Amino acid sequence: MQSLAKKKHRDAQHLFIAEGEKIIRQLHEANFNIQTLVGTPALLDKFSSIDCEMLEAEPNEIRKISTLTTPREVLAVCTQPNTSIETLKLENELILALDDIQDPGNLGTIIRLASWFGIRQVVCSLHSADCFNPKVIQSSMGAIAHVALVYTELATFLEEARKRNCPVYGTFLDGQNIYTQKGLRHGIVVLGNEGNGISTIVARQIDQKLYIPNFAAGQQNVESLNVSMAAAIICSEFRRNAR
């Protein structure tokens, strides 16, 4: 079970670990396949309706297999959902595309934002952080149960999406003010790498460059927004326009 902390083992076994009562309950309600539950007797009793292997453990035993600084009293071994690029719906949808997002905390937060704003699909480049990394699962706060994630060659995916008349947006310093643009309702929004932004090959597939303006003109301010902060602003603006 401890081996699932590493991506190569998660991929080989097609499994991942989720920790905490709330997250496990959300996964179960979303029909994720839970293979094994490990927890204290009191916590396992709360999941008696789940048909899976139940392993009782004391808190000190759970601590040994937990990936968290503060372990929860129950954890689950779950099967990774089998979502393919062919199952994605493009028409009249808002989709987030992640171009080599590296930080698991950022990825988890973006998944949580997607769920909050009713975005059902997130497309990741092949070199983005693994969505089944325990840190991603925890920072998504259970939202991974409600958002379909797929990994693919991002530039190729965007090229095909454009052929199907799906607009592609991305944030750039030389983009147009997001607050003055009309028609921002549906399409694919590309979010770039934390340090390098959107890659050149992906940028070639972007139809409209957007910019989140800085309102602290003339004042000392931060150089840029964290990618998950930018994602929140972008999602909010697209949803506001859709109304």
Image: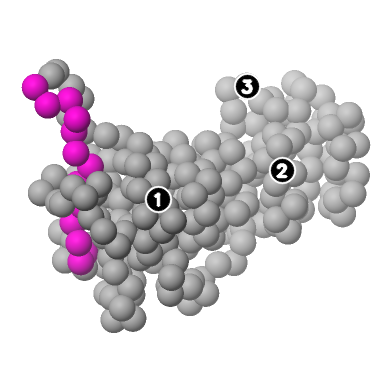
Contact check, label 1 and label 2, Cβ < 8 Å: no
The local secondary structure at tag 1 comes to: helix
What's the CA distance linking mark 1 and mark 2? 32 Å
Q: Point out the stretch of residues depicted in magenta.
A: 206-218
Under mark 3, the amino acid is: Thr
Q: Which of the 4 image quadrants contains residue 68?
A: top right
Residue under label 3? 70
Query: Does residue 126 appear in this view?
Result: no
Q: Is residue 213 magenta?
A: yes
Residue under label 1? 240
Report the disc number at residue 64: none
Query: Does residue 185 appear in this view?
Result: yes
Mark 1 vs mark 2: which is more N-terminal? 2
Which residue is the extreme one toward the top? 220
Under mark 1, the amino acid is: Arg
Q: Tell me what residue is drawn at x 42 percent, y 53 percent.
A: 239
Q: Tell me what residue is drawn at x 8 percent, y 22 percent.
A: 218
Answer with left or right where residue 197 lies relative to residue 134.
Answer: left
Answer with left or right where residue 77 lies relative to residue 119.
Answer: right
Q: Nearer the viewer, residue 81 or 59?
A: 81
Residue under label 2? 24
Where residue 10 sits in the image (x, y, percent)? 57, 52
